[in-house]
Amino acid sequence: MAGTITGVLSRIGVRQGSPQLIKITLTCTADAAAATYPDTVINTLSGVSDYDLRGLKLYSVKAYPGGIAPTDATDLVIEDEHGIDLLGGKGVDFIDATSKTWIPAGPAGYVLPAFITGNITVKISNNAVNSAVTTIVLELNGD
């Protein structure tokens, strides 16, 4: 089985006049033989593609291991259409084998939401566990 990343977009109800909140939940399964995850464009995933992400801001990213946990300190990069890491390097060693983790978007040393202006791509690396599962949650808003 080749590794897969699937996604579900949820619109979170907010009180009238508040900015919209969007949660994208990604189920990431590593390849059964090579332990690798595919680089995946989030905007075009079934379950996400019906909603235009452009104009939203990525505020935070959460991750938690599945039944077959990934290698501890697996790396995550979320790139924009120019190849710029929207996490500013904070995704190095981010995915944990036993704990739930959370980081804000923006460059290292800062908490600064990142505008989504085109396709965003999730890249997961440094995992050595075949068929490892991790869930990644992207939290965006449209303020």
Image (cartoon, grey):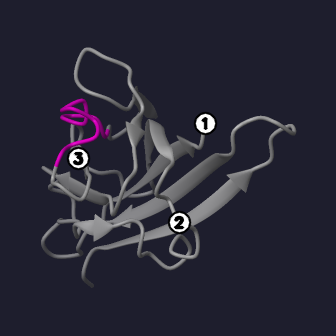
* Residue named by callout 1: 143
When the figure is inspected, residue 121 is found, relative to residue 75, above or below; the finding is: below
Whichever of labels 3 and 1 marks the residue nearer the N terminus, that label is: 3
- Of residues 37 and 61, which is closer to you in this image? 61
When the figure is inspected, residue 87 is found, relative to residue 117, above or below; the finding is: above
Residue span colored magenta: 84-95
* Residue named by callout 2: 52
Query: Measuring 58% from the left and 68% from the top, which residue is drawn there?
Result: 51
Whichever of labels 2 and 1 marks the residue nearer the N terminus, that label is: 2
Query: Tag 1, which secondary structure?
Result: loop
Q: Position of residue 129 (x, y in %)?
A: 21, 58
* Residue named by callout 3: 77
Query: Measuring 41% from the left and 75% from the top, which residue is drawn there?
Result: 44
Q: Position of residue 114 (x, y in %)?
A: 38, 37
> Residue farthest to the top?
109
Type of amino acid under label 3: Val
CA distance separating discs 2 and 3: 21 Å
